[in-house]
Amino acid sequence: MGMNLPKRRMGQTNLMVTELGLGAMDTPQVEEGVETLKLALDSGINFVDTARDYQGSEYLIGRVIPAKENIQFCIGSKTFHRTKDGSQYDVDRSLRTIGVDVIDLYQLHDVSSQSNWDQVMQEGGALEGLQIARIRGLIRYIGISSHSPEVLEQAIYCGEFDTVMVEYSAFFPHTDRLISLAKERDIGVIVMRPLGGSGRVSSIRSRIASGYDGILTPATLLRYVLSNPDISVAIPGVRFPARVRENIQVALTWQPLTADEKQECEREAELLY
């Protein structure tokens, strides 16, 4: 039964997405992957992040879609190809693998160096391939993911992208400047690794199991990201149904962190690694 999860507008796409999405990179790696994705969709999550290079992720989504024909949700996939032909090839493969006629959002994947940026943006580059796919009606919107602040700033200002995917968390608070820039230009913001990544989350869970009762918990880390009104959707990676339930509980009940709480989170995050 779908829950009434809060939604946010994804910039100029005008897509209304739940502020809690699902990062499906690792979901296929466990037996419970199908159950995890079904639970997320049944619970009301309506944005699923995947990519051609996420082993089995698009295939998993394709397995689940026929059983969820009555549920409307957005799929965001990505291509690691840097050329026009390569990105078009990946779009066609994604459509076949997922089993849909159109994909809501297709992104250039991990464009995190100036040379990568120059390659995808040049004539015959991967951006041109996605633009052709959009003209063909195979994708609706074009985005980019990057770990480079310099590349992200160029992406925000160039006017070619509907969304940007950025790393943002108590561990990476400095990207809030880029998020504000994107908001000013009505570009949707997808937050990857909102809990800091699987390694950090594992360390945090181990500390909690050993008696830690401080502020740096998965729930508070998710609240940290959701407290930024300029993001569109956070996509914590999830393998197991129990983690979906935990994230849903936060999404339904969270309160914004105070400035003092945010600073405390950031201080403790600095000390973790």
Image (spheres, rainbow, N blue to C red):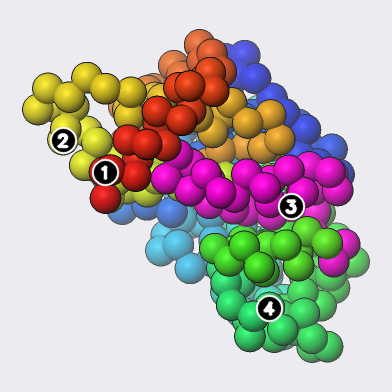
Q: Is residue 165 magenta?
A: yes
As measured in the structure, the alpha-carbon distance from the residue carrying label 2 to the one carrying label 4 is 39 Å
Instruction: Compute the Cα span from label 1 to label 4.
Output: 32 Å
Residue 151 pos. (x, y %)? 67, 69
Q: Do the residues under discs 2 and 4 have CB atoms within 8 angstroms?
A: no
Q: Earlier in the sequence, mark 2 or mark 4?
A: 4
Question: Position of 187 compared to 54: left or right?
Answer: right
Label 2 near label 1: C-beta < 8 Å?
A: no
* Circle 3/circle 1 CB separation < 8 Å: no
Dot 3 corresponds to which residue?
Answer: 163
Instruction: Using the numbered discs, state the Cα–Cα distance from disc 3 to disc 2 in whole angstroms.
Output: 35 Å
Q: Which of the two residues, 104 or 188, is positioned nearer the viewer here?
A: 188
In space, the residues marked 1 and 2 are separated at their CA atoms by 12 Å
Q: Is residue 64 visible?
A: no
Residue type of the residue flagged with mark 4: Trp
* Residue contact at pointers 3 and 4, CB within 8 angstroms: no
Residue drawn at 53 percent across, 18 percent down? 258
- Residue 201 belongs to magenta span: no
Question: Which residue, given by chain and number where applicable, does mark 4 sit on?
Answer: 117
Give the labeled residue for mark 2. 206
Q: How far separated are the C-alphas under marks 3 and 1?
A: 31 Å
